[in-house]
Image (cartoon, helix red, strand yellow):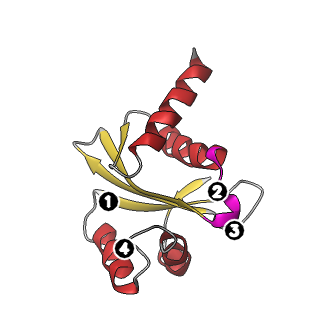
Amino acid sequence: MLTQSRQSDEKTIMGILSLLPGLREISHLNAEIAWYHDNEARSLYVWQKESQGQVLGVLGVEIYNNNIAIIRHVALTPESRSVRNYFDMISDYQAQHPETFLMGTLDNQKLINKWRKATSRKTV
């Protein structure tokens, strides 16, 4: 289940995002989180499985032109990293925003392409 992050999720978000390369330094991590909070077009989401209350992932999204979403960050805790969980997190976002076309950054576009290919097979 993907939900928009709240102030109470801040430490969990920091912990999960700090697992990503380039966000291990606290100053850079704080700047990145502030970047999301500085603009309405940017959002951080937390992801958890329905059966658990524990946050397992973070999704950072930036909206362009109301119909294109760039997935800036996609991160899962080490014990929950699996292709299925990555795909579930992205699919949850797409289900909540069905009119939005998803794109990735240079770092995660391959994941988005694999997700798109896997989910398009299900509908054919």
Q: Nearer the viewer, mark 1 or mark 4?
A: 4
Q: Name the element at disc 3.
A: loop
| Disc on res. 33 | 4
Measure the alpha-carbon separation of dots 3 and 4: 20 Å
Cβ–Cβ below 8 Å for labels 1 and 3?
A: no
In this orientation, does residue 120 appear?
yes
Q: Is residue 12 above or below residue 63?
A: below
Q: Name the element at disc 2.
A: loop
Q: In the image, is 104 to the left or to the right of 41?
A: right
Q: Is residue 11 above or below residue 32?
A: below
Amino acid type, label 1: Arg
Measure the alpha-carbon separation of dots 4 and 2: 22 Å
Amino acid type, label 4: Ile
Measure the alpha-carbon separation of dots 1 and 3: 23 Å
Measure the alpha-carbon separation of dots 2 and 3: 14 Å
Residue highlighted by disc 3: 54
Seen as rendered, the residue at the extreme right is 51
Location of residue 78 in the rendering, given as x and y in whole percent from the top left corner: 65, 65
Location of residue 77 in the rendering, given as x and y in whole percent from the top left corner: 62, 66
Cβ–Cβ below 8 Å for labels 3 and 4?
A: no
Query: Which residue range is magenta in the image?
Result: 77-83
Cβ–Cβ below 8 Å for labels 4 and 2?
A: no
Q: Name the N-terminal-most of marks 2 and 3.
A: 3
Residue highlighted by disc 2: 81
Residue highlighted by disc 1: 42
Q: Name the N-terminal-most of marks 1 and 2.
A: 1
